[in-house]
Image (cartoon, helix red, strand yellow):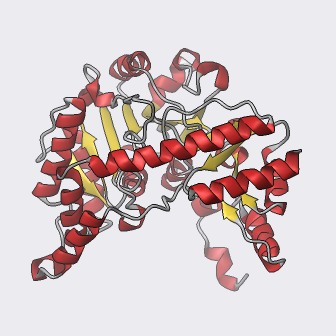
């Protein structure tokens, strides 16, 4: 600590404590003992970006026009490519000029939409457990939060009828995320319809994070909220190439939906960043417009891993609900999630404690399948030794 620690803003001080600090310390301690760690805690694909996309950025990097500032909203060709995917995959028509904007990864847009829409006394309704940015962004903006629990008995969907009318009246944003991180649950069209009706009545914005919409198994296809009648009047969807094409490090995503909300997000971005690098956009255009066989191959690989790990957990004695989507397993455990995580750490397996995603995540751990089949088998072997 230095004298400058006193000048840190009150908003920054309000952020939740870094729960994983002790786990990180424990990881370093175990590494010093010489035990290799199998890290199943991070949702970062281990499979490389498909070759044709890598080749596209190599080519684009040699184009001198791509060395200059990009546009704030993204190349029209990129926005047209996003529109093409929504049209072909979901039968949703989008205007590339008005209803689509490029993002420096969806996380950037998820944060900045709060700057675009929220005043001090406005409420953002967020799920609990959830992707942490839904909670930290309103704190940094200085607005209020209402947390709605995601419970197993409700298939990890918010119970829309239990949220008080007063909250709906004061809400500006309602966050949803399906397929869901961390619970791996999915949404139904009936749920979306109910939420859209509420948004129309109370005039709040539905922000739908659909980063995992293409990671689905067993022939299941997850809908986008924009397929629902009137959705575009009250909704904005955040999407990403990170999970679909194994491009987490590339930092490119998009927001699509209501043109007024897209315009507001653009106005924020013009004051904060200078857009996505043109060469990355060129590679993303190739990803979105070329044969989507690579996506099917990626998903097939995750399905193999899911089946392998679910079977292994069942053999150990866990009750596991096989996820329909994402590359996560949300595993119910019989003790607090921090203690369980520490036990696994002692055996060289790293997972994420559910409490890290919110208080209703307690009693669960999140397992990420972004490791090779060999490593997953070794993780199961270590878990069997621990729980035999």
- Please tell me which residue is depicted at 17% across the width and 76% down the height of the picture: 59
* In front of the other: 225 or 206: 225
Regarding residue 182, the answer to whether it shows in the image is no
- Please tell me which residue is depicted at 54% across the width and 31% down the height of the picture: 185
Residue 283 as seen in the image, left or right of residue 22:
left
Q: Whole-percent x and y of residue 43?
A: 54, 55
Regarding residue 24, the answer to whether it shows in the image is yes
Q: Whole-percent x and y of residue 189?
A: 38, 19
* In front of the other: 95 or 53: 53
* In front of the other: 317 or 286: 317
360, above or below 341, in the image: above
Q: Whole-percent x and y of residue 285?
A: 18, 58
Quadrant containing the N terminus is bottom right
- Please tell me which residue is depicted at 85% across the width and 40% down the height of the picture: 335
353, above or below 321, in the image: below
Quadrant containing the C terminus is top right
Q: Whole-percent x and y of residue 357?
A: 64, 46
- Please tell me which residue is depicted at 61% across the width and 29% down the height of the picture: 150
Mark count: 0
Residue 20 as seen in the image, left or right of residue 80:
right
* In front of the other: 126 or 114: 126
| Quarter of the figure with residue 379 | bottom right
| Quarter of the figure with residue 337 | top right
Residue 58 as seen in the image, left or right of residue 244:
left
């Amino acid at each position: 600590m230095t004298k400058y620690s006193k000048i840190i803003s009150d908003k920054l001080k309000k952020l939740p404590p870094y729960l994983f600090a002790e786990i990180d310390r424990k990881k370093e301690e175990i590494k010093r003992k010489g035990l290799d760690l199998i890290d199943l805690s991070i949702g970062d694909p281990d499979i490389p970006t498909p070759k044709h996309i890598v080749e596209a950025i190599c080519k684009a990097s040699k184009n001198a026009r791509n060395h200059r500032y990009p546009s704030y909203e993204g190349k029209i060709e990129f926005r047209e490519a996003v529109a093409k995917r929504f049209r072909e995959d979901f039968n949703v028509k989008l205007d590339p000029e008005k209803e689509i904007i490029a993002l420096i990864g969806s996380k950037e847009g998820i944060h900045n939409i709060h700057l675009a829409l929220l005043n001090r006394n406005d409420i953002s309704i967020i799920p609990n457990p959830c992707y942490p940015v839904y909670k930290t962004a309103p704190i940094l903006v200085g607005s209020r939060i209402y947390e709605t629990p995601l419970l197993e008995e409700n298939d990890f969907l918010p119970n829309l009828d239990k949220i008080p009318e007063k909250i709906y009246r004061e809400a500006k944003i309602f966050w949803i995320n399906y397929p869901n991180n961390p619970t791996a649950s999915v949404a139904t069209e009936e749920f979306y319809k109910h939420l859209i009706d509420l948004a129309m009545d109370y005039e709040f914005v539905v922000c739908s994070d659909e980063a995992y919409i293409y990671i689905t198994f067993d022939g299941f296809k997850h809908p986008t909220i924009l397929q629902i009648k009137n959705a575009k009047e009250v909704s904005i969807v955040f999407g990403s190439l990170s999970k679909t094409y194994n491009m987490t490090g590339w930092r490119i995503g998009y927001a699509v939906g209501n043109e007024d909300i897209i315009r507001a997000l653009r106005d924020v971005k013009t004051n904060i960043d200078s857009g996505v690098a043109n060469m990355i956009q060129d590679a993303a255009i190739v990803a979105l417009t070329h044969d989507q066989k690579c996506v099917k191959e990626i998903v097939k690989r995750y399905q193999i891993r899911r089946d392998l790990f679910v079977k292994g957990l069942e053999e150990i004695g866990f009750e596991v609900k096989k996820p329909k989507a994402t590359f996560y397993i949300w595993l119910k455990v019989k003790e607090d999630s921090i203690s369980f995580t520490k036990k696994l750490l002692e055996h060289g397996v790293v997972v994420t404690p559910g409490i890290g995603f919110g208080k209703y995540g307690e009693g669960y751990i999140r397992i990420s399948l972004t490791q090779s089949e060999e490593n997953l088998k070794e993780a199961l072997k270590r878990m069997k030794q621990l729980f035999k």
